[in-house]
Amino acid sequence: MAQLNVSIAGKIYRMACADGEEDHLAGLAAEFDRRVSDMQQAFGQIGDLRLHVMAALTVLDELQEVRKRLSEHDAEMRAVRSALAGGDQRIADAEGQAAAALIRVSERIESLARDLNPMSVSGGAVAATPAFAVTPPGD
């Protein structure tokens, strides 16, 4: 276990941490020292213990606010995922409906084609009588 000295409000504290965490702990101590110093500038000399408690409470207040926002963002993400999943299902349903409609249209076209020309659709010979006739002018 590693040990290092940190300075908070001008006092040295010997701290222990896991090996490799020294820089992280030093950074945390420096941030806390800054907060205590800010409290001291705002409220004057009201005692080290009181300054430390006030600084700790402000840190906890910020932490609580961050947790609240994180929880709200998590809820928003769940809602977005749910909406996307619902959208995927609606797309799949629409694709199924479109495919069914295409099949119905195709069947109707085939039925109309059979009704218009039963011989050509069934594979037989083309009808001998044309559906219309062109007559030259004056006849």
Image (spheres, rainbow, N blue to C red):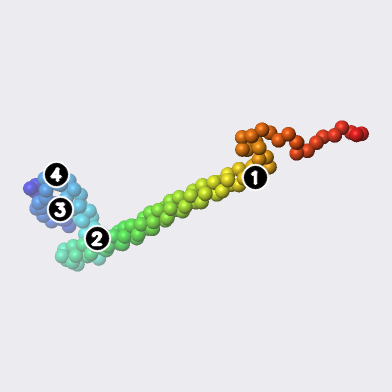
Residue at label 4? Answer: 20
Residue at label 2? Answer: 59
The kind of secondary structure element at disc 1 is helix
Horizontal side of residue 19 vs 138, given as left or right: left
Residue at label 3? Answer: 7
Give the foreground label among 2 and 4: 4
Measured Cα–Cα span from mark 3 to mark 2: 18 Å
Measured Cα–Cα span from mark 2 to mark 4: 24 Å
In the rendering, at what x and y percent does residue 87 appear? 44, 53
The kind of secondary structure element at disc 3 is strand
Residue at the image position 27 percent from the left and 62 percent from the top: 64
Task: Give the mark nearest the N terminus, 3 or 4.
Answer: 3
Please say if 81 is above or below 123: below
Residue at label 1? Answer: 112
In the rendering, at what x and y percent does residue 15 appear? 10, 53
Determine the residue located farthest toward the right in the rendered image: 138
Q: 113 or 25, which is in the foreground?
A: 113
Near mark 4 (Cα within 10 A), the count class, few <14, some 14-19 or many ≥20, is few
Task: Give the mark nearest the N terminus, 1 or 4.
Answer: 4
Measured Cα–Cα span from mark 3 to mark 4: 19 Å
Measured Cα–Cα span from mark 3 to mark 1: 92 Å
Task: Give the mark nearest the N terminus, 3 or 1.
Answer: 3
Please say if 126 is above or below 93: above
Q: Are marks 1 and 4 in contact (CB under 8 Å)?
A: no
Task: Give the mark nearest the N terminus, 2 or 4.
Answer: 4
Residue at the image position 36 percent from the left and 57 percent from the top: 78
What amino acid type is highlighted by mark number 2? Val
In the rendering, at what x and y percent does residue 29 appear? 18, 53
